[in-house]
Every structure is written in C-alpha cells, then in structure tokens.
Amino acid sequence: MLQLLLEPFTLGFMRRALAGCLALSVAAPPLGVFLVLRRMSLMSDVLQHGVLPGIAIGAIFSGLSVWAMGLGGVAAGLLVALLAGWLARRTGGREDSQLAGMYLVALAAGVALISTQHSIDLTHLLFGNVLAVDRAALLGMAGVATVTLPVLALIWRPLVLESLDPGFMAATAGRGGLAHLVFLVLVVLCVVSGFVALGTLMAVGLMMLPAIAARHWSDSLAGQVRAAVALACLASVGGLELSFYRDIPAGPAIVLTAGGLWIISLLAGRRARLWQRAMTDA
Amino acid sequence: MTAVPAVTLHNVELRHGARVIVSGLSGTFAPGSLTALVGANGSGKTTLLRALAGLHPLAAGRIDRGGLRPRDIALLAQGSHLDRAFPITCEEVVALGGSRLGPFRAVDAKRWAAARAALDRVGLAGMEHRQIQALSAGQFQRVLFARTIVQEASLILLDEPFTAVDAATTCLLLSVIRDWHAQGRTVIAVLHDLELVRRHFPRTLSLTDATGTWDVLPDRALQAA
C-alpha cells in the first residue's frame, strides 16, 4: 500500500509537481479563507478567468516560456482585479453580474487567442499538465509561496480589521485600501503560479475549496487557516496520486480530491455539520 | 488622551448627492460637553456625525476641530455595517480597536489587560474568548462600547448607541457615557428617545430644520417622524 502511494513520486516530474503543489498548498488557502470571509469567492473565479488572456499573449510572444506566460498572467490578473474593484465601488458592492460578465469575456478572449496558435494545447493550459512542471514552473510556485506568507503576515491585522469592520478601519487608520490592494496582488500571484501544474481554470480550486471546507473545522480565524492548509496539502498529495493512477489531468484531480474533503468536512466536521443543522431546523 | 479642544461648526452645509440636508449650521461643542443630536430620520444626524469625524465632505463652511487628529476621534457607527459572522473573539475586537500597532508590534500584555478591563466595565467579564457571532445584539453593542473605551478618544461620536438594546443594557451603556463625560471627553450621541435625552444630556442639537436648533427639544415624539 505504502509502496503504491510512494511510487508516483519516484519520478522526477511527479516530485517537482508535488513540491510545487505543497508550496502552493501552504500559501494559497490562507488567502482563500480571507476571500470566503470577505464574501469575495466570486472574485477568485473572475481572476482565474481574467489571467487567461494575459497568459495566452505571453505564450504567443514567447513560445511557451513559463516566465513570459506568468508575467502576462499577472499583468492581466491585476488589470482585472483593479477593474473589478472599480466596478464594486461604482455599483456599491452589487457588482456580481458585472463580474460574471467580465469573466465570460475574459475566458472567451483567452480561448480565442490560444486557438490562433496551433502549437499550444488548450487542455493543458486550462486544466494543467504535471509533465510541464519544469524547474522554472517549480521555482515560480515556490517563489510565490515564499513571498506570499510573510507579506500576508504583514498585512494580517489591517486585513482582519478591514474585513470585520471597514467603516471603523476608514475612521481610525484609513489605510485599509492598501492592505486590500496588496491582498489582491497576492491572490493574483497565487492563481498565476499554479497554472502550469493545475491549469488556469483549476488553480483557484486549491485556494478556495480547502478554505470553504475549513469553516467546518474551526471557529477561529487562525484555526481555519491551519485547517485549510492541512486540507490543501492532503488534496495535493491525493490529487497527484489520482492523476497518476487514473490518468486524469492534475488540475481536475486535485480539485476533485479537495471537493471530496469538502464533502467530508460538511458531513463530519466539528461544526456546522449538515445533519446538525438539519436537526436544529427540525 | 490628549487635551480636549472645542469643536466648532462654521456655517456648515452637508449634502447627500444633490440634496441639501444641513445648511448654515453653526455652533460650538465645548470641551468635555455631552450633547444629544436629535431629529427625524433623514434629517442628517448620521451625516453630521460622519462629517465631525472627517468622513463626509462639507459642501460649504468648515469644522474647526482644534487640532484633533483622526485617532483622537472615536466614531461608533451603527453596528449593522460590521460583519458579525467574522470568526473573532470579543477580546480581539476590543484589542484591535486601540491605538494602531503597525504591522510589526505584537499585542502586548498591557493592551490585552486594557481590553479585558473594558469588557469588564461593560459587564462582559468572562466572555473575553466568546466568538462575536455567538453574542446577542445587546452584548455585541457592549463589545463595541468596550472598543470605544480603549480608543481613549478626546471626541466620542455615537450613532444611535441604544438601538436594539434592552433597558438594562441601555442603563449600563449610559453609565459608560457618564464616565466619559466625567473624564472630560466631548461626547456627541445621535438619539431618538427624547425622554432619555431630557434626563441625561445637558446639551442638545436638534436638526428639525436645516440650520439646526441648540438646546431646544422639539415637543413631539421623534420616533413617529
């Protein structure tokens, strides 16, 4: 059994994918916890679609250099994040229809751009390809994780205050906007860094699903962050096994595993269990 | 707390979009005064409070705050804007309300002690580690008062502090307001209950018309308006 579990990781590319996904599993879920708490889950969807045109343009100009695609993705992601923030202010927080519109257009533009290039495999770009996790991609994932954690620690307090009580933040400190902006940059970085292994459409899964599931394991913010990281690591390992043995692209395999953990959390988590709620409702 | 200056309004005009809600409002909140701000819904009480805090632009006129900095001013907005589902304890909400820590400094023992003392003052001793989502509306308002206590502000602005709060809690929170008054802080509170205003607030500013009326309460009950 153990042999079976370890066997995929005797291969170099699987080890690289595992190291990258674990790095991302430590960095991305804490951001996801904040996205969930701030009711910005839809924003993550918008970003993952939003980065696609940028990645496509990077690929067209560089011929599949991970750095160029990453740079294009980050630029497009930041543009989309700023645009969404502007929309949110214009519409007084009721921007969900505009956000939905934006991500449809971004996805279509990305797919259209990529299909002009016959050398690029759309499936790999959208859903990930562990075989493509080379040294550059691994460095990207590890580098982003290394930057994300300390920066998140730095903006933790204003971010908590801004999520809890934006009015109070504005009245006393007035710099909640900066923390929010830095936070969005981190989200974009994490989404983009995961695209090689997980695919642009699945990269957010490792950020959001563990964060959603973590709410069933802890009452405290720190507890939710720890639970989300643990769940993401489990999903990464389990997903890569699934990908290896069932020949499923890594992105969907990891997201499906994370989804399974979410369902387990829903049923067996320490709080807000489905059946508990059903009991109190009855 | 820094020295408490007078806060003076000079011909203040406030607008909501194109609509003028207050105009030509002048007067002084003396240092250490305790004033109730009354008026019908939509008369501009909350907007005036926000303008005093520097959060709403003046269409005309000016407010002289006597050199008060933003951190010398505490605004307790109506609690509905706060995310009650956020996973955070009473103690943490209060501790985060104190003067700014910056990104590096940890919350030290002194700050935790101040937070606990403030929670104790509002009758929440023993509930320090309770999550805010588990609190009743009254308990939650007490937490917000505790946070206002640790802000150690010279000018304290309260927007309908007794809404959705029972009689016992109102009584307790009033005693906190009296503490602030006794300490020489300037307190301005938006209130609807005229009986309560008559009994506990030495000064009033009524926004029944755009220019405002000082120290004369309207006769009719304002809740009906």
Image: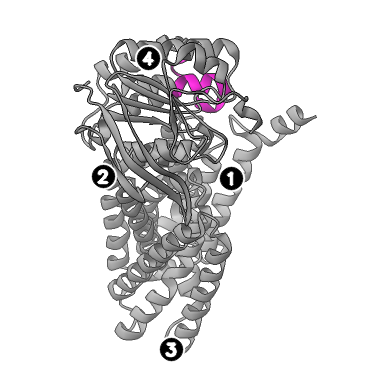
Both marks 3 and 4 on one chain: no
Magenta stretch encompasses residue A121? no
Tell me the residue that label 2 is attached to. Answer: A150
Mark 1 or 2, nearer chain start: 2
Which numbered circle lies on residue A262?
Answer: 1
Q: CA distance from mark 3 to mark 4?
A: 65 Å
Could you tell me which chain the residue with mark 4 belongs to?
Answer: B
Q: Which residue is mark 4?
A: B118
Badge 1: chain ID: A
Amino acid type of the residue that numbered disc 4 sits on in the rendered structure: Ala
Q: In this rendering, does residue A247 appear at all?
A: no
The residues tagged by marks 2 and 4 sit, at their Cα atoms, a distance apart of 32 Å
Residue at 26 percent of width and 16 percent of height:
B109
User: Would you say the residues marked 2 and 3 are in contact, meaning their CB atoms lie under 8 Å apart?
Assistant: no
Q: Amino acid at mark 1?
A: Trp
| Amino acid type of the residue that numbered disc 2 sits on in the rendered structure | Pro
Q: Are marks 1 and 2 in contact (CB under 8 Å)?
A: no
- Label 3 amino acid? Gln
Q: Secondary structure at mark 1?
A: helix
Specify the segment rendered in magenta.
B127-144
**Secondary structure mostly taken by the magenta-highlighted segment of the chain:** helix
Nearest the eye: A118 or A272: A272
Mark 1 vs mark 2, CA separation in Å: 27 Å
Q: Chain of mark 3?
A: A
